[in-house]
Image (cartoon, rainbow, N blue to C red):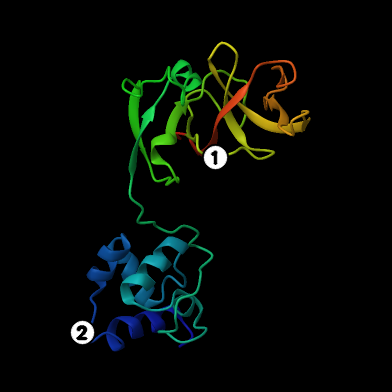
Amino acid sequence: MKTLSERLKYAMEVLPPKKIKGVELARAVGVKPPSVSDWLSGKSKNMDGPNLIRAAQFLKVNSKWLATGVGKPTDEETKSEFVNVSFENVPFIKIPVLDYVQAGVFGTVAYDGINPIGETYTTYIGTHPSEVFSLTIQGMSMAPDFLPGDSIVVDASLTPQPGSFVVAQNGSYEATFKKYRVIGYDEYGREEFELVPLNPDYPVLSSREHKISVIGVMVRHVRDYK
């Protein structure tokens, strides 16, 4: 079968126990019946990517075979250049949305955990769910990767690694979001570090010069696209 028309007729009329009508295929693919008629008559020699994938899935045939005739109709489907996503069946977990003052005292006796500014959901599953929270990015210090209005999910049970994005507490018990960079070790073997903004117009904070403690490590970054 050298043409799309021949392969499509075979998939609709020979392979299935009951012949599939053109209108049924059109409905499954999301096109108008005349488009299917053009494929079956040979007027249209090819299907575009999304239509090909949907047609192959509905007809239960290999999309590569349907498009080119290579292989067998019922060969196990391999990854297609048109398909680069998959669906996950992961439960959602409710987490608090904190402001920067609440985040600054998170994990201390000053944080009551009772009145977050809001709640949201995440599929991130940490070792200690009670230590996971969300923040909304403010300011431009982490632009262009993180912009005002973006949301991040933070796990306070994780230890930062060089290059981690972290939420840290300054001496005023307010939170800041920066990149974690190790610069050495103190006399007790503890890491000395810098909090580095991605925007070079903002200052770097050093644990050698400021009282800084890391609250948690960013594990998710969420941005709305409109």
SS type, badge 1: loop
Instruction: State whether residue 47 is above or below residue 3.
Output: above
Residue 31 at x, y percent in the picture? 31, 60
Which label number is shown at residue 18? 2
Residue 47 at x, y percent in the picture? 44, 67
Residue 56 at x, y percent in the picture? 38, 73
Residue 64 at x, y percent in the picture? 49, 76
Label 1 crowd (10 A; few <14 / some 14-19 / many >=20):
some
Frontmost residue, 189 versus 23:
189
Relative to 214, 194 lies left or right = right
Q: State the quadrant of the C terminus.
A: top left
The CA distance from mark 1 to mark 2 is 57 Å
Is residue 7 visible in the rendered image? The answer is yes
Amino acid residing under circle 1: Leu
Q: Residue at (70%, 22%) from the top-left corner?
A: 207
Frontmost residue, 10 versus 140:
140
- Residue at image mark 1: 158
Frontmost residue, 191 versus 66:
191
Amino acid residing under circle 2: Lys
